[in-house]
Image: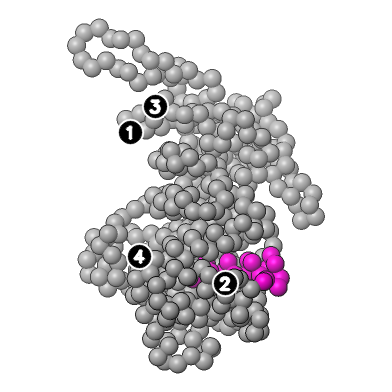
Amino acid sequence: MAAVERVEVPAVEARERLLDFVGVVVAGLPHVRQRENAGLYVRGLIEEGGRKSLQPTLFRLEESSARYESVQQFIADSPWDPALVVQACAERVTPGIAVEAWVLDDTGFPKQGRHSPAVKRQYSGTLGKIGNCQIGVSVHAVGSAGTAPLGWALYLPEEWCEDAERRAQAKIPASVAFKTKPELGVELAERAAGWQVPKAPLLGDHAYGENTALRERLHDAQLEYVLAVGPATKVFPPATVFTAPEPAAGPGRPKSRPLPDREPETIGQLIARLADGNAQTVSFRDGPQGEPLRSRFVFARVHAAHNRKKATPWPPREEWLIAEWPAGKDEPSDYWLSNLPADSAPERLARLARMRWKIELDYKQLKGELGLDHYEGRSWIGWHHHTALVTVAHGFLTLERLCPPAPRLA
């Protein structure tokens, strides 16, 4: 996938195209000054320079202190809905990137101190360790021609939910309650599913794939997924039969839940049994020169072993179990569960399973070029406003790369 190339915005034509694009995607903002400030903020994110926090950005743009106060209020306090801006941007960008999948993930934002909203010492995959940081959950559309963020949510730790003083200082609305990262992620996906953007299977790592409630909620929302799981995840093997128990004599409520004719087993054990005679080598990606990259996979239809005591569907529905077992290796390298149709081609299952890496490139571009992690404010809505406008900057650069020079927008 080609990188999002930087645009020389100071050139008059490019600046005009930028302002036209921003004007379209923020047209829903009710006030002229809000729309002007959005254009200025996005321009600052794109222009060459160091840190993209507000003060140095406006200094580089030679803006006045009055404009600084206006933009600061627009980001930190103004009551505009960032999701509407992300939606408008996504609906304009996604038609051009040949969407193949959506990717759900989270990323860390290292912070100093304890006053930035939702900051705490917690594990961050970005840091690769426990550190003082915020965690942002996001969903992105990824395609052969680029990517487009579809939504952002700041994870609010439980200790923040219970601290009225910190909540007030960070301007966290009373309506914001604790939600897990999977809950935040599935809400973002459900919201984006209502937009005019191409739907595609949702991809995610173990933290999301091993969450049964998330998979069920996605399936109920008619969203397809290919989600990573670990080898200890239990499933009922192929050909398991679920039969209603015989009515029991005597008093008491009769048992009605169908019973499986065998016990569940870990997917690691199952794949080890199935690999001989069932493994196949398929193409999962195109290489740098367009040549197919291949690996050895095992595919099986299974029933995930949900907790029967919880309110989950029973008997569990059938899913795809996918395992990559590279030739010459002692064990599989990765496993996934998917609700794609039973007649899905092995090549498509493998391709989707191996596509999640694109999210790391997206985070790298958003942070390294556009200052996604440079927001220094202490406002909850300010963080969401910042990520929305970074999304707009990213969308503009994507369209510039896809169609240089981009025509002016009507």
Per the image, is 405 magenta? yes
Residue drawn at the location 23% of the way across and 17% of the way down: 253
Q: What residue span does the magenta drawing correspond to?
A: 389-407
Q: Which dot, 4 or 2, sits closer to the camera?
A: 2
The residue where tag 1 is placed is 311
Q: Residues within 10 Å of mark 4 (few under 14, many from 20)?
A: many
Verify CB contact (< 8 Å) between mark 1 and mark 4: no
User: Distance between the Cα atoms at labels 1 and 4?
Assistant: 31 Å
Marker disc for residue 21: 2
How many numbered marks are there? 4
Q: Residues within 10 Å of mark 1 (few under 14, many from 20)?
A: few
Per the image, is 220 magenta? no
Name the secondary structure under disc 3. Answer: loop
Name the secondary structure under disc 2. Answer: helix
Task: State the residue in front, 342 or 114.
Answer: 342
Image colouring: one colour
Return the x and y of residue 243 as percentages of the image width and height.
42, 15
Regarding residue 109, the answer to whether it shows in the image is no
Name the secondary structure under disc 4. Answer: loop
Indicate the amino acid at tag 2.
Phe
